[in-house]
Image (spheres, grey):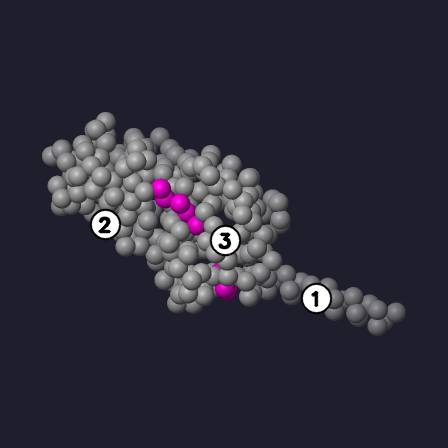
Amino acid sequence: MRVTKQFFALLILLTHAMAASASPLTVAIAANLKYVFDDLAAEFKKETGIEVQSALGSSGKMATQIRNGAPFDVFMSADMAFAEGLYKDGYATTQAQPYAYGLLVLWTQKDADLSKGVVGLVDASVGKIAIANPKVAPFGRQAIKALEYYKVRAAIEPKLVYSESVTQVSQYVDSKTADVGFTAKSIVIAPEIKGKGKWIELPPESYEPIAQGVVILKHGSETNGEAARKFYGFVLSAKAREIFEKNGYAIRGITAP
C-alpha cells in the first residue's frame, strides 16, 4: 500500500512538473495580424485547449529572426514569398499555404481629403504620408505599387515617411505625426481603432493581391509538433476563414489544402 501511495504521489508530481514546463505555442505573425490574431487564438484554444502566444513584427523582420534561430513554432507572413523562402531554405517543414488576402487602405485622422484616393495625395494640403518599409513589409511594397499604378510616386516621394511595419504606420497616423498612412483594412476596422478618423479601401487593380502565407517552422516540428500541426490546420479551416473575413480580409479562393 505504501509503495502504491508513493507511486501515485510521484506520478502527480511528475504531471505537475510537465505541465509547468510545457510552453504555449509561439506564432510569429505579420504586423497586420495584430488584432485578428486574438480572435484566432481564442477560438483555437476553445477548440483544442492549447494556449497560443504571438511575436509581432514586419514579415521580413520575423523571417530574419527565424533564420537567426528565434524559437518560433509557426510563421504567419503577410505574403507568400517570405514564408516560401523559409521552406526552401530548410527553416520550415511545410510549404507555404495562403490563409487570407490582405486589403490595402488609406487612413487619416486629420482633415485630409481622401475622396480622390491615391492621386489626391499630391495635393499641397497633404503633408507627411506614412508607409511601411517595402523591403520588409509586404503592405509597404504594395503601397509603392499603388503609387506607381497612379503614376504619382515621384511627386509623393518627398512626403513619404517610412516605418518598420503597418503597426508603426498606424502609430504615426494615430498620433497625427503623419497626415495619411497606407495600412491594412484589418487594422482600421479593429474595435480598438474603429471610428478613429476616416479611411478608404484602394481599388484591387491598383496593387498586386496580398496573399498571406503560413508555414510550420522547423523548431515547431521538433519541439511542439502536434500543437503546431493543429494550429496550422486551424488557420486553414473554414472557421478561421470566417474570422479573417469578419476582420477585414478577403478569402476568395482560399480553401483547405
Q: Residue furthest right?
A: 1
The answer to whether 26 appears left or right of 112 in the picture is right
Q: Cβ–Cβ below 8 Å for labels 1 and 3?
A: no
State the extent of the magenta-drawn residues as a range.
Answer: 209-219
Question: Can you give x and y, in whole percent of width and height, for residue 131 in the image?
Answer: 25, 45
Residue carrying label 2: 162
Residue carrying label 1: 13
| Residue 224 drawn above or below residue 146 | below
Residue carrying label 3: 53
Q: Nearer the viewer, mark 2 or mark 1?
A: 2
Q: Cβ–Cβ below 8 Å for labels 3 and 2?
A: no
Say few, some or many: other residues with alpha carbon within 10 Å of mark 1 (under 14 / 14 to 19 / 20 or more): few
Question: Can you give x and y, in whole percent of width and height, for residue 141 in the image?
Answer: 28, 48
What separation in Å lies between label 3 and label 2 (alpha carbons)?
Answer: 28 Å
Q: What label sits on residue 100 in the rendered view?
A: none
Residue 255 lies in the magenta stretch:
no
| Residue 108 drawn above or below residue 21 | above
> Mark 1: which secondary structure?
helix
Please state the total of marks drawn on the protein image: 3
Quadrant in the rendering for residue 126: top left
Q: Residue at 29%, 40% (x, y): give it.
A: 207
The answer to whether 118 appears left or right of 56 in the picture is left
Residue type at mark 2 is: Tyr
Question: Can you give x and y, in whole percent of width and height, for residue 195 in the image?
Answer: 35, 30
